[in-house]
Image: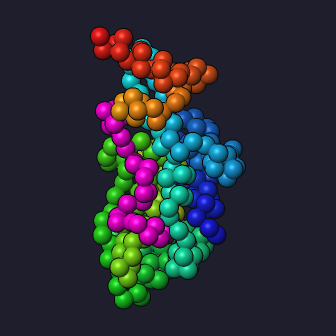
């Protein structure tokens, strides 16, 4: 299974329900994603922007699908690891990796040069990602790999997929993506706007309304002055 197929399967994976979840009966991310094809994800923009006309705020959303698929790879090690993950319902590995079965971790544990560099959850920092990611950055034989879960539930404390292993791109130095940054602050977004990198905005409250970059620039200047 290639990278796009693997990420798509994760995006539509049933990560369960809980009666305290927000979003009603069908509002969880995995439920909404199951209505989409892999082509739908391929066709969505890498990043999109919403504009709060009253407040003058810009909100950026970064597609998890594009963020993960543009640079990550599936090699033979990933394939073997992920196949075992697909066949297991237990996260019983005795290690610092989340969402991993003992059988899958045994593959890594038998290798001579494996280091878990860090574990992370994007919920704990600034992030524009369309869904939360949880995982670990791993060095295997001096090459970078990522063990990743996608959050498909409603509450960030639970509702994660089985972890999958990906190999980083050749450029990679602990980064998942080469040029799509996980987060941009307001000054970076406004600079992109001024330099013409953002063309279209959707209204923050009504997605049927769109704005051009000229309209957004004009409105921000009205508010600031």
Residue 223 is a magenta residue: no
Which residue shows up at 49% across the image and 53% down it?
67
Q: Quadrant of the N terminus?
A: bottom right
- Asked whether the viewer can see residue 94, the reply is no
Q: Is residue 141 above or below residue 159?
A: below
Residue 69 as seen in the image, left or right of residue 217: right
Residue 177 is a magenta residue: yes
What is the magenta segment's predominant secondary structure?
loop
Q: Is residue 14 above or below residue 208?
A: below
Which residue shows up at 59% across the image and 48% down it?
30
Which residue shows up at 37% across the image and 50% down it?
122
Magenta-highlighted residues: 163-189
Residue placed most toward the observer, 150 or 54? 54
- The figure's colour scheme reads rainbow
Residue placed most toward the observer, 200 or 124? 200
Residue 102, how many percent across, how many down? 46, 77
Which residue shows up at 58% across the image and 38% down it?
27
Q: Is residue 170 above or below residue 141?
A: above
Residue 83, how many percent across, how many down? 59, 75
Residue 207, how many percent across, how many down? 58, 25
- Asked whether the viewer can see residue 67, the reply is yes
Residue 138 as seen in the image, left or right of residue 22: left
Residue 224, how many percent across, how many down? 30, 14
């Amino acid at each position: 299974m290639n990278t796009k197929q693997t990420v798509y399967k994760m995006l539509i994976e049933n990560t369960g329900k809980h009666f305290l979840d927000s979003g009603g009966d069908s509002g969880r991310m995995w439920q909404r994603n199951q209505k989409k094809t892999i082509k739908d994800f391929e066709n969505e923009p890498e990043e999109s922007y919403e504009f709060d006309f009253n407040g003058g705020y810009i909100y950026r959303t970064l597609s998890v699908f594009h963020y993960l698929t543009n640079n990550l790879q599936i090699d033979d090690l990933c394939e073997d690891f992920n196949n075992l993950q697909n066949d297991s319902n237990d996260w019983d590995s005795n290690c610092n990796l989340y969402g991993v079965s003992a059988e899958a971790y045994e593959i890594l544990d038998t290798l001579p040069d494996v280091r878990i560099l860090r574990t992370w959850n994007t919920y704990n920092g600034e992030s524009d990602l369309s869904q939360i990611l949880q995982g670990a950055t791993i060095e295997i034989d001096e090459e970078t790999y990522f063990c990743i879960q996608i959050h498909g539930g409603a509450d960030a404390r639970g509702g994660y997929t089985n972890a999958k292993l990906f190999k980083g791109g050749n450029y990679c130095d602990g980064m998942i993506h080469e040029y799509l940054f996980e987060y941009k602050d307001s000054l970076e977004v406004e600079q992109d706007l001024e330099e013409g990198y953002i063309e279209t905005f959707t209204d923050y409250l009504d997605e049927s309304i769109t704005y051009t970059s000229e309209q957004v620039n004009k409105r921000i200047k009205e508010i600031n002055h």
